[in-house]
Image: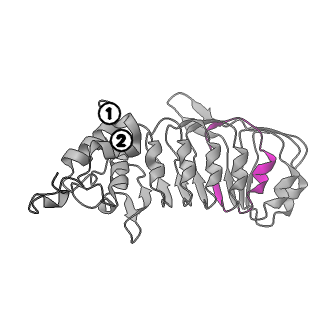
Amino acid sequence: GPSQSAKPSFEPSVEDALTLEDLEGIFGDKVYEANSSYAMAMNWILNEDSRQLKRTSPNFVQRFVLALLYHSTGGDGWKRTRFLTVDHECEWYGISCYRNDSVQSISMSQNTMIGSIPSELSMLPLLQKIDVSRNEIRGTMPTTIGGLTSLNDLRFDFNLFSGPLPSEIGRLVHLTTLSLSNNSFTGAIPTHFGDLTNLEKLYLTGNKLNSSLSTEFYDMASLSEFHCGGHQVSTEDRRVFLSNRLLGTISTLIGRLTRLEVFKIAQNSFWGSIPSEIWELTNLVNLDVSRNGFSGSI
């Protein structure tokens, strides 16, 4: 038959138009689930987005993932609405990008977000910061977050997250701040957190954690602040303690954490004596071990 090149040149090329199949190839058959956040993001990028990206557009994956974030967290009810606009996604609210237009950070604190975080956020591989603190996001923390190995700042505090802390967080070796306070995380502080040798600030206050501190915990050599106390909420008739229930003893290995400035573990269930090594930590300025079961004197 006639070769393809015989096609009239004035015909617009549909060959590189972005299609449902392209999206399915990357995001799987979730894009077909009726009324799901995936279907809504797909409909937006294929039919409503006036940019009409092509399959050759280098940013179609990241634009889709951000549309998915919007539809997964109740974007129509967000406090700030400059999102899913005709602009490049780097211009949208809360998004900042590198010079090459890949997403560098998502900062959406106090944005009346609900719903849950889609696991596909891990398809923004160069992300350095995610701050979705002080929203009403539910569900578990996606284990895929461990793929975002450029992250140095992760803030999920003051939300409604539940379930275990994923051990995959231990892959985020560039993290300097991890703030997960005031959620309902349960279980243990994963031993893999010991791999976070650049972590400086770890905030876990006001969750429902109940385990001992593993030996690996003391491998976080850069740790300067550890906040893991209970936390008090006043209602009209009473004060409620939302509390972690960490238990066991504090190891003499705490002497390794030479950069420690703040160590707050009040309102847990630790016991035993406080190791003398703690007094050799010359940077320690704020120590709160009250309301535990420690014995001996301080």
151 or 30, which lies in front? 30
Q: In terms of image quadrants, where is residue 62?
A: bottom left
User: Mark 1 or mark 2, which has the lower sequence index?
Assistant: 2
Q: In terms of image quadrants, where is residue 281?
A: bottom right
Q: Which residue is outermost to the bottom?
A: 99
Which residues, given as a range, are shown in magenta? 198-222
- Helix, strand or loop for the magenta stretch, by majority: loop
Q: Amino acid at mark 2?
A: Glu
Percent coordinates x, y for residue 6 in the rendering? 13, 60
* Disc marking residue 32: 1
SS type, badge 2: helix
- Tell me if 174 is positioned left or right of 134 in this view: right
81 or 229, which lies in front? 81
Percent coordinates x, y for residue 17 in the rendering? 23, 52
Q: Which residue is outermost to the front?
A: 1
For the residue carrying disc 2, how many other residues have a C-alpha within 10 Å: few (<14), some (14-19), or many (20+)? some
The residue tagged 2 is 24
Percent coordinates x, y for residue 53 in the rendering? 25, 56
Q: In terms of image quadrants, where is residue 186?
A: top right
Q: Amino acid at mark 1?
A: Tyr
Report if residue 95 lies within the magenta region.
Answer: no
